[in-house]
Image: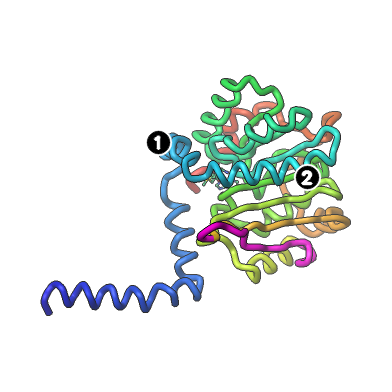
């Protein structure tokens, strides 16, 4: 077989296999695995990400910030948590747009947190901080958070069911979580229902939608509302990190969490 025919055959197999891989979820799982092992969150990867992400994600972050602001302004001094805050662009934008808010970025990667903290210091915003933690173990007190937000992080979470239980634990009863993820890596509606059940939540508390876009629709939004469910969740899915006494705002960041080395589990 000459080279041209070989390439033609290869392309034909690719065209046949790709839609099937996408439909079966294989492509999504493959992408998730590659992304999780990419080393993106080691120092050099984090710096690269911080540099180039705004070019690609500026529009998403702006849209998400608008969504979060519209939820947050319902509360007088809202507490907003960004899970998997990375180099901090979204958390900083929200903190800037809602000066009355306190915004806490949570991320397991020290390299990401350092970049985020440096940006916060440069912007002189006093209402934003970045702490070490995982979506599955958030170092914040129960029922103190008005809005949880997350962008492009969920497909990295090793245990999304524990993360849902944790989100339900930290949200106030009228709080809401908005989790945005890349469509090609995001969990399906049935996977999300399974996570919800494992987390002790009513699957109806979780909604998944593909967001509208101009030419393509690259993002998925998962909404989690826990009205009336938080107490049940604590009973069925206890989590190990508890912060004893909430501060007046209803949120507590443990001392030393800022450097986060004790909780560093990146690269597990
Ligand atoms: C692709 S980056 C997204 C960063 C940022 N949210 C953004 O939109 O630019 C994914 C982030 O999720 C974080 N991450 C990975 N595993 C996590 C977990 N279990 N819980 C919370 N965040 C996690 C990574 O450290 C990384 O900063």
Q: Residues within 10 Å of mark 1 (few under 14, many from 20)?
A: few
Q: Is residue 126 left or right of residue 212?
A: right
Question: Is 157 a magenta residue?
Answer: no
Q: Quadrant of ligand 1?
A: top right
Question: What residue sits 76% from the left and 67% below the top?
Answer: 203
Q: Secondary structure at mark 2?
A: helix
Tell me: residue 12, above or below residue 58: below
Pick whichever, 163 or 99, lies toward us: 99
Q: To which quarter of the image does residue 86 belong?
A: top right
* Gap in angstroms between the C-alphas marked 2 and 1: 35 Å
Give the mark nearest the N terminus, 2 or 1: 1
Instruction: For residue 41, say whether it is visible.
Output: no
* Image mark for residue 71: 2
* Image mark for residue 44: 1
Q: Could you say where residue 15 lies in the image, as x and y percent from the top left?
A: 35, 75
The magenta-colored residue range is 200-216
């Amino acid at each position: 077989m000459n080279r041209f025919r070989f390439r033609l055959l290869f392309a034909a197999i690719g065209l046949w296999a790709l839609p099937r891989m996408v439909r079966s979820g294989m492509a999504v799982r493959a992408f998730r695995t590659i992304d999780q092992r990419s080393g993106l969150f080691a120092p050099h990867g984090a710096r690269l990400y911080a540099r180039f992400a705004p070019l690609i994600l500026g529009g998403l972050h702006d849209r998400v910030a608008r969504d979060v602001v519209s939820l947050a302004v319902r509360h007088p001094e809202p507490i907003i948590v960004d899970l998997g805050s990375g180099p901090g662009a979204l958390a900083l934008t929200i903190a800037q747009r809602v000066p009355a808010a306190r915004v806490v970025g949570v991320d397991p990667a020290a390299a990401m947190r350092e970049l985020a903290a440096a940006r916060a210091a440069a912007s002189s915003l006093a209402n934003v901080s970045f702490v070490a933690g995982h979506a599955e173990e958030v170092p914040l007190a129960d029922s103190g958070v008005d809005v949880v937000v997350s962008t492009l992080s969920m497909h990295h979470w090793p245990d999304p069911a524990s993360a849902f239980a944790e989100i339900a634990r930290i949200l106030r009863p009228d709080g809401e979580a908005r989790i945005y993820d890349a469509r090609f890596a995001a969990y399906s509606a049935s996977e999300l229902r399974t996570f919800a059940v494992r987390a002790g939540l009513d699957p109806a508390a979780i909604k998944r939608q593909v967001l509208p876009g101009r030419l393509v629709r690259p993002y998925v939004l998962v909404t989690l509302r826990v009205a009336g469910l938080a107490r049940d969740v604590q009973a069925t899915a206890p989590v190990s990190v508890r912060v004893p006494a909430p501060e007046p705002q209803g949120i507590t960041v443990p001392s030393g969490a800022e450097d986060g080395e004790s909780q560093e589990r990146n690269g597990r």
